């Protein structure tokens, strides 16, 4: 048996009866201390992440895909900035999936996703992903249920395809409360520096809160697997959320155990002239 | 007239008679102090770069393309890591151009490059670029001169196309000495952690040093323009090189002057419920 990891705290095991309303969005369970102590611990994890990324890149045989999903204002952008600032951008690629284009809609829903899969040695971060096709698409009935419901199985098959090609997939839901979302949207209205992020459509979407929670619950329950787990991270406190995501990534990369490749034959002892 | 900027020190003006052998690769001219003081200045520039990147992203109307070229072991990877670690990876995309694939060779030489152009709000970094098509291609006669020579003009036309679509292009040659390259390649042989980067082909390429210097000289002289300048940065000392590239980027972004967009009508005063 693999030994227990800190990140198991947030992992959703297959066949768990998931109830998002019972996961405290303000939790700081397991944090190494108060806010400042946790930030200090995150700085250590960030340095460790940078080391592991350098090895992954040098090895060039495995890749890591982090899927980030959340309600609007759930902290996806802030997480990317906080977790990956400090990692060599040459080895990390962030892909933000927006509403699909006409060209993308003229293909299967995984076509644009597959095209962005990480190559060996690379970390890819999906800010939104194929899960939107069972979240917003379901909530607004953009396609009928007989189309979106079989997507859980199609997603599992797709993720399995990547997994056997040495891509480790970890999926994280940043879980905030409805009140926290209200405060953050209000801040976007009130703060001139954040106002550009405000989108009147977010207020409309906020009315569908319960439908989104139901869609998240089923999506996570049906697609969390041993190989491609979902993690639900309490997201109301940014410093806890950042530490949790860093912990998940470091635990995952340590298990992947990338190594600097051995020297090719004849290299050792070469004299450069 | 635009006021003189610190980065003008390394800028190659159009119609300059360029002689790379007269540019001291160990220069520290203009550095704000000794090694440690320069590193401290770079930390300040890095924070400024992060601020400017956040504005560029929020504004979403202009983009920045940094083209990095150098001899083998010239420090391209190290520059990317040092300059951009700390910037939000969501707004920076690093593209490493390798030897072209069969599919890429079946198109014009700018096809694969064009596909990677930054979108508005984004910074793209090209680690090698279309300039390889007048460098390695010329040195090894991979295509005849009547094909590669007209590429200077084609590159200017391509870069003009991007420029008028609000992409600012800056091109940097990291300029090292032949002796510095020897030391760095030897280090790759001797240091187990760096050995994975060693490529026996680099020893072969090293024999063409003078041909590459000639090819760089003509490429730079023929494609440096007021709008899309080349900078030749002394690269033997990493700390000076990083500071210089940071200075060039910050100067460039300050001139681009990205702004947080104004609020859409009716947003101010909205109450989120």
Image: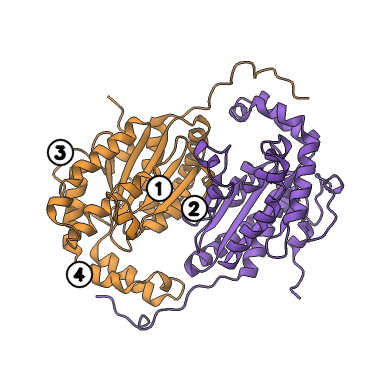
Chain colours: A orange, B purple
* Label 3 and label 1 in one chain: yes
Q: Position of residue B159 (x, y in %)?
A: 63, 59
Q: Residue beneath label 3, please? A: A15
Q: Which element type, helix, strand or loop, lies under badge 4? A: loop
Q: CA distance from mark 4 to mark 2?
A: 32 Å
User: Label 3, label 1: how many angstroms apart (C-alpha)?
Assistant: 26 Å
Q: Numbered disc 3: what chain?
A: A
User: What percent of the width, then of the height, locates residue B131?
Assistant: 66, 47
* Labels 4 and 2 within one chain: no
Q: Which residue is mark 1?
A: A125
Tell me which residue sits at (48%, 45%) in the image. A92
At mark 3, the secondary structure is loop
Q: From the top left corner, tell me how far across and down residue B252 is, in percent.
A: 65, 64
Callout 4: residue from which chain? A
Is the C terminus of chain B in the top left, top right, bottom left or bottom right quadrant? bottom left
Res. A228 in view: no
Disc 1: which chain?
A
Q: Is residue B152 left or right of residue A218?
A: right
Foreground mark, 3 or 2, reads 2
Residue at disc 2, secondary structure: helix
Quarter of image, res A198: bottom left
């Amino acid at each position: 048996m693999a030994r227990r990891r800190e990140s198991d705290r947030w992992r959703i095991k297959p066949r768990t009866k998931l109830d998002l309303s019972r996961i405290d969005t303000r939790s700081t369970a397991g944090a190494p201390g108060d806010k400042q102590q946790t930030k200090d611990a995150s700085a250590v994890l960030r340095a460790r992440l940078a080391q592991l990324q350098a090895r992954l890149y040098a090895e060039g045989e495995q890749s890591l895909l982090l899927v980030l999903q959340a309600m609007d204002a759930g902290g996806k952008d802030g997480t990317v900035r906080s977790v990956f600032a400090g990692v060599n951008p040459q080895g990390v690629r962030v892909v933000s999936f927006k509403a699909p284009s006409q060209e993308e809609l003229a293909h299967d829903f995984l076509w644009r996703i597959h095209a962005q899969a990480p190559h060996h040695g690379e970390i890819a971060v999906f800010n939104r992903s194929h899960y939107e096709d069972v979240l917003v698409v379901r909530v607004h009935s953009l396609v009928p249920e007989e189309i979106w419901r079989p997507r859980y199985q199609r997603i599992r098959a797709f993720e399995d395809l990547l997994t056997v090609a040495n891509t480790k997939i970890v999926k994280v839901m940043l879980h905030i409360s409805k009140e926290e979302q209200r405060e953050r949207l209000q801040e976007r209205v009130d703060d001139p520096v954040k106002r550009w992020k405000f989108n009147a459509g977010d207020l409309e979407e906020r009315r569908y809160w319960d439908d989104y929670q139901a869609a998240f619950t089923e999506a996570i329950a049906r697609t969390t697997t041993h190989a491609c787990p979902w993690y639900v991270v309490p997201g109301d406190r940014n410093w806890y959320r950042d530490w949790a995501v860093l912990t998940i990534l470091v635990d995952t990369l340590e298990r992947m155990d990338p190594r600097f490749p051995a020297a090719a034959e004849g290299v050792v002892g070469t004299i450069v002239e």
